[in-house]
Amino acid sequence: MHILISIALSLVLALHGLRKKSLTKSGALCALLVGIITLSNNCYTFTVVLFVFYFTGSGLTKYKAERKKQLEEDYQDGGQRTAMQVVCNAFTGTIICIIHQHYYGGQLKCLLDDRGSRLLFWMYIGHYSTCNGDTWASELGILNKGWPFLITTFKKVPPGTNGGVSPLGLFASVLGGLIIGISAMISIYFADGCNRLYIQLIPVASIAGLIGSIIDSILGATVQVSMYSEKYRKVTYSMTEETKLVSGYDLLDNNQ
């Protein structure tokens, strides 16, 4: 029965993402698989964390969409995340779910009772905290009133530049991790039978969110190219005669 519920609920969520344009067709299929695997885990906290990551990220992508269209060359209505983007964000967390279910599925009253289970749980929280922190920073940081600064040189750069950081973006990254920590803390207490509020989840997840955003910014500033189009007055990732280099080398893209 558990697996049937997991399939049904994952299908509903994948179709919801497709209808809301949060996912492409390939992204929805990949998200369906991620959902089935995660929801099949006997520990509900894994599912809660995944849902918080998905729904908050999708919601923030649509926040002030018109403004983002003006600043981002590759902005897609609703986000329209592809299978590659789903894999990049969920692969590690999904593998952790599989390993945890194999060794501990249904065996523990509280998923923190065993050292190995505890390690896998913290890895899962760390993964989605960094992902959520980076997502929140990207979706909100671009709306900062002033131009961001490049994390490697501290020079002002146009909004949307890979590696550009701002006070709003850094604050958002902490909040992104924070919401993961709070949701996990509440879920463990009420749904996974631990009968204790693990307050330490909040600072750890918050710091992980910030670290994830900073690491992504450093990589963006160095191994991803950002060009600026004077004609369209926005950051672009393609080199033409009328664009000028802002930062980085063309080694990786946003999915790598």
Image (cartoon, rainbow, N blue to C red):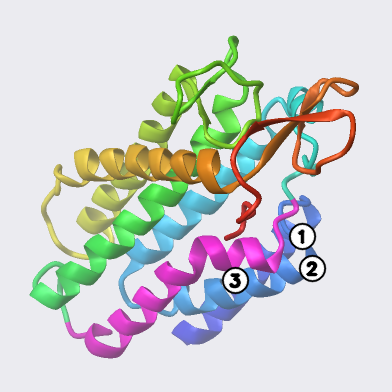
At 36% from the left and 46% from the top, the residue drawn is 180
Tell me: residue 151, above or below residue 95: above
Q: Nearer the viewer, residue 6 or 100?
A: 100
In this rendering, would 24 be left or right of 216? right
Q: Are marks 2 and 1 in contact (CB under 8 Å)?
A: yes
In this rendering, would 248 be left or right of 183? right
Q: Are marks 3 and 1 in contact (CB under 8 Å)?
A: no
Residue 26: percent from left, percent from top:
75, 71
Amino acid beneath label 2: Lys
Q: Nearer the viewer, residue 57 or 158?
A: 158
Disc nearer the start of the sequence (2/3): 3
Amino acid beneath label 3: Ser
At 90% from the left and 21% from the top, the residue drawn is 231
Residue 48: percent from left, percent from top:
41, 58
Determine whether the residue tagged by mark 2 lies in a helix, strand or loop. helix
Q: Where is mark 3, residue-wise? A: 10
Q: Is residue 249 magenta?
A: no
Task: Give the number of the mark in front: 3 or 1.
Answer: 1
Residue 82: percent from left, percent from top:
71, 62
At 89% from the left and 34% from the top, the residue drawn is 241
- Residue 18 numbered tag: 1
